[in-house]
Every structure is written in C-alpha cells, then in structure tokens.
Image (cartoon, grey):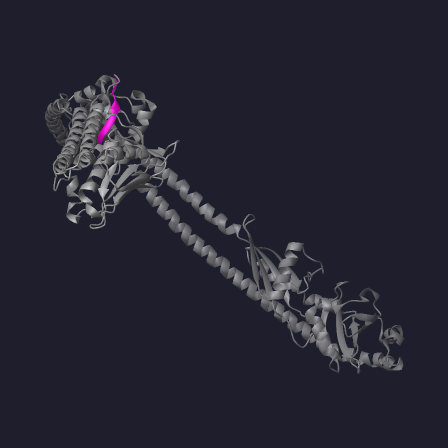
Amino acid sequence: MIILVMFIVGFMTIYDYVNLKSSIDSEFTSFQNQSETSIAEALRQDDLATTILDDQLNWQMERGFDPLFAEYNRSGKNPANMDLSGVKKSLGNEYDIYIINESGVIVYTTYSPEQGEDFRSIPYFFTYLTRIRLSQGFFADRVVRDISTGNLEKFAYEPTPDHQYIMELGYIPPDLSSTYLVLNDKNDIEKFVSINPFIVQFQIFDTLGHNTVDNSLPDNATEAVLTQVSGNRETMETENIANHTETRYLFINLSNPQYGSDMSRIVVLTYNTGLVQDDLNHLVFVHLLFGGFAVGVGCFIAFLFSRRIIRPIEDIAHDADLISNGNFDHRIGTTDEREFRILEKSINTMVDSLNSATKKLNDEEIFHRDLIDQMPVGIFLKKSDTGTYIFWNRASEEIFERSAKDVIGKTDEEIFSPSIAAQIKKEEGEALASRLEIKYKKITSKSGAELVIHMIILPIYDSKRSVRYMLGIAQDVTDEATSLKRDLIFSITRSDILDQLAIIMTHLERAQIKTTHEEMQMFFDKTIGSVESIKNRIAYERALQNSEVISPRWQSVNQAFAEAIQMLPENTVDINTGVGEIEIFADPLLPRIFFSLLSLSFRRGGSALSSIRMTGIRNDNKFTLIYEDDGVGLPAEEKELIFDFGYSQENIVSLFLIRELLGFTGISIIETGESGHGVRFELSVPKGRFRERKQSGPVSS
C-alpha cells in the first residue's frame, strides 16, 4: 500500500511538473518573442520618424557650405589660412566647422575638444568619409549624439574640389533636443517591458557601446559582449545560473548605406528565470506535502493490517528457527487460518523428510570417511580460501609422521618449515591449471628419514566452477625406487660384463692361431685389459649398493661424462664435450646413464661412427643437454620403442630404466636424431636443477 501511494503521488508530481514546466516555458517564450518583436518594431518606427526630421534640416545645412567654400577659395585652398571663426560667426553659434584630411583626422575645427579626432578608430565610418572625399556634392548625415558631450547634433559633409579634404558642418538647433525627447527610445521600450513579468531590467546602447539615455559606458564585461554583438551584428544570449537570470543582447539593425552614422541599437534585456523555477518548486512542495500525508495514512493502515497477518507468520518462523538449529523432532504449531494450516502441514512433512535424509547422509558420510581412512595411500584435503586442512587419513599420518589432530585446522605455514610451505604453495599453484602429478618426489619425514613419494594434486570445484578444495594423494614408493635403481645397475653391469667376455673370447681365439710369442702376447694383453674393465665395473656397481643410492646431488656434467668415458673399452672414436662449467642436480648414477648412451652409439653406430659429442643449450627456464654421434642412427619406428619397458633388439639395452631414473629429479629424455645421420638425445633439465660450476675444465677423449 505504501509503495502504491508513493507511486501514485510520484506519478502525479512528475506529470504536473512536466505540464507546468511546458506551460511556463511556452508562456516565457511567447512573452519574450512578443516583447522583443514589439521593441524592434518601435525602434524602427522611431528611426523612421527621426529620419524625416533629419531630412528637413538638409536644405539648411547645404546652404551653410556656401560661405565655407567661399572662405576656402579666398585662402588659396589652404585650410591653414582659413578664418573658421569668421565663417562660424556668419553662420551662427549653432554651427561648428570641421576640416578632415585624407587620413580621417580633424585637422582644423571651431570646436577645440574634437581637434585631432581620428576616425580611423571607427572603420566603417572612415570608409564612409573616404567615399565622400573621393566623390563630389553634398552629403547629409543623421542627427546623432556627440561622443564627448552627449548632445544631439546634425552633421553634413562636402568634399573639396581637389579631394584632399572634407568640409563638415555640425548644427545644433535650439529645439532639436526637445523634439527628439518625444521620440525617446527608452519611453517606447518601457511600455513593452512593463507588460512582460519576466523582464527585470533593460538598457539601450548604440553600436559604439554608449548608453542612449545618458551617453555612459557600461562595465567591462558588458562592453566586451556589446563589441562582439556589434561586430557580428546578431543577437546574443548569456545565462547566470547562480542569480537565475538570462540576458538577451537584442541587435536592432537600423543601418542605412545612405548615411555614415549607424543608428542600429542593442537592447539589453535581463529576464528572471527564477520565476519559472519558483513556480515549479512550489508545485513540487505541494505535491510532496500531500504525498507525505498520504504515505503516513497508508503506513498506519498498513501497520494495522500487517499486524493481523504476520502474527501467525511470526509463530511459524519461531518454530522454523528451532527446527533449523537441529531440533528435527519439533513441529510447527497449529493456527486458525486455513492457508497457514496448509503451510504448517507442508513444513512438517518437509522436516520429516529432511530428518530421514540427514540420518541417511550421516551414515553414508561415516562409511565414506572410514573407507577413505583405511585406504593404503595418503589422502588429505584442504580449503582453497584459508589453506587449512580438513581431512588427513591414517596413511598420511604414517607417510608424513604427523597425526590428524596436529594437522586438521592448521595451514602449511603452521605445520612445515617455510621452505617446504613455499614449495607446497608453488605445487598447488601449478595444479590449479590442471591435475599435477609428481613422480619420485624426495621428502624428509618428521623423524629425519628420507622418503620417495608419488603424489597427485588436483583442485576440487563447486557448482560455480570456483576452486573450493585442494585434494592430495600420496604413496610411499621408496622401496620401489630403490629396487628400480638396483635393477638398472644390475641390468647395465650384466650387459657390460657380457660384452667384455665376448671380447675376451675373441682375443683368445685369435691368440691360438698366432705363431709368434709377441703376437700372442698382444692378444693376451688385450684380454687382461678386458678383465680389468670387468673388475672396475663390478667395483663401481658395488660402491653404489648402499643407503645413499636414492639421494640425488649436484654433479658436474663434464666430470660425469668423463667417468662414463673411462668405462669404455679401448677405441679410436673422437669423444668430447662442450657443455661448459655446468652442474645439474641428478642421481648418483648419472655417469652410468651417460655410459649407456655411449654404449648405444658403439652398438648401433657401425663403421661410420667416428665422433661423439655432448653440448648444452641454456635459457632462463631450462638447460638442454644434447648427446649426438655421426653413426647410422636409429630407424624412425624405434625412437620411442627404445624407451619402452623390456624392449631389446639387436643387443640394444632398454632405456626405460634410464628415463625413469632421470625422472626422479625432473629430467626428461627424448631421441630426435635423423635416421642414417646418427643418434641425438635431448636431456631437458628444468629450472632450479642446473647451475654454473665455480671450477672449470673441459673433458675430451
């Protein structure tokens, strides 16, 4: 009801406001057009009347030039020798004489205040005088107000025969001012201004900016606008928002090309626009007054009705609060109203269903929690907004050696060291884009034991696709990683020993067919070298069979590659490295990995194999080791097969274990060589797993 009343009052107020404003604006415009049209027409009628009066004096002014030109001829046509005072005396004191040179300057006159007057300051009048000087005959002007005295005076002009000067007569008859008072501009305009309630002030100016009533000049701001109006010869309008006034500079064009003086007028009309706003404000006030009264009455009536309606609703709301707080055995109280009885029955039915669903949900939650808690892999869950853990199963307690009560409700910063917390935050940031899987991550448990775990981190989204939880799954693969490395050692060692035994058998067979002791001794020496190589490799592998076999460390690439070269049998292949002083964080078996690559080159390089080189390419994000030879290379179909588990063809030892071993520290390996042009392996070392070594020394063989 309140909204309805406010809508009606508001609509009526806006409707009346728009109508009244339109009506007042129309009335204002009508008064304005009527007043300005009447003022312009009155000034034109006055100008026509004064023109008739002016013309009646022309014959008298023309006769006055006879004695003036007689004196001009007597002086030898030299104005300096003319007796202007004598001519003025003969014409009468009502006359004044002016002689204007070709520059538009009054050089001689009987009226000393205007001696030296320069008409070039009035461009249009100077143009008029120049036209007269270059013509001949009598030229009458209008009755105008003298600039210095403000007196009304009739002027006429006639050029000298040589066109060097202009003779000017000024005439002030005794009854001229009284005659023109009858045709006063102000009196005519006051009649029309008085009937326009919006006009608060008016002034009349000529084109030179003088007030036609008292010949005064306006203030600087008004004078600037008058100058602009005179120059543009069109009406202008200004507005003073603070004073609620609008000023119209009405230009009345009364110019006549026959006369030099421009009789045009600028009527300055000041309108009071505040009257319009006052009427509108009064209308709004009245509407708001009645609207407020109507709203007050509506509020009182609405209160009485609402109390009767909402009392049963309050009782239902109270019962609903008890139920929402978990008291599902509570019921909605009965009411007398039919509609509320239906609501009561519906809510009670809903509460029964909710109670049953809640019990079922609790049972399922307990089952799922126990099921996850018994799983052999670590599972933990944390809120994405606060970073606090909300679930930590038993396997997580065993892997990380931290009980659930020490983890639940805490953040990584409260549980782990700053470096570990920063690493977890980085991993979760990477997992936000997609599921993050970390293989063979090395951690240190709370007791100090070093473990290798396989971890998966993935975000859990809500219905709005916003990340709500971060889920982690961890599995302890320490024993599996250790077995994998030992299998690699055993596989490589067995392959190497078999190769050396094959070489020994070959040397012994060749020694049997030799006839001299020196030739036989040469093969025996080679056989002893192969036996020493087998011995060294067995000792090397035995040194790796200890508890540190799973601990990666910083290693010089050059040094590891050199150790791999030393495990090779005697050969003539040019082997070198151009990696530079780079160390990488890798498994202790890095020399064995390089040796496996070298062995592959010797097995598959064929007779074309003559050189092997290791180079490196470094950028901001990773460091790439490039191993390549100039042998026959690998067929295209074998480039990925060689990394498959258990793959072996033509004595190629499977590189599956090598790829897995490098993966412990995030290093990847691929084969990119071109068949027939040698093998090419690229080992990509991620950022943070390589650095510049302080000591230097190239490796070559």
Residue 158 appears in which quarter of the rendering?
bottom right
Magenta segment main secondary structure: strand
Look at the image and tell me in which quarter the C terminus lies: top left
Q: Do we see residue 676 in this rendering?
A: yes
Look at the image and tell me in which quarter the N terminus lies: top left
Q: Is residue 159 or residue 21 the one in the foreground?
A: 159
- Membership of 439 in magenta stretch: yes
612 above or below 231? above
Q: Is residue 319 or residue 292 the one in the foreground?
A: 319
576 above or below 415? below
Q: Do we see residue 94 in this rendering?
A: no
Residue 648 location, x and y as percent?
12, 39
Q: In this view, does 210 lie to the left or right of 388?
A: right
Q: Is residue 258 left or right of residue 670?
A: right
The residue sitting at the front extreme is 516
Q: Is residue 436 or residue 58 the one in the foreground?
A: 436
- Membership of 606 in magenta stretch: no
164 above or below 490? below
Residue 419 appears in which quarter of the rendering?
top left
Instruction: Please count the marks in the image.
Output: 0
Q: Is residue 269 or residue 106 the one in the foreground?
A: 106
Q: In this view, does 612 lie to the left or right of 506?
A: right
Residue 644 location, x and y as percent?
14, 39
Residue 391 location, x and y as percent?
21, 24
Give, as a single range, the part of the protein colored magenta: 438-446
590 above or below 124? above
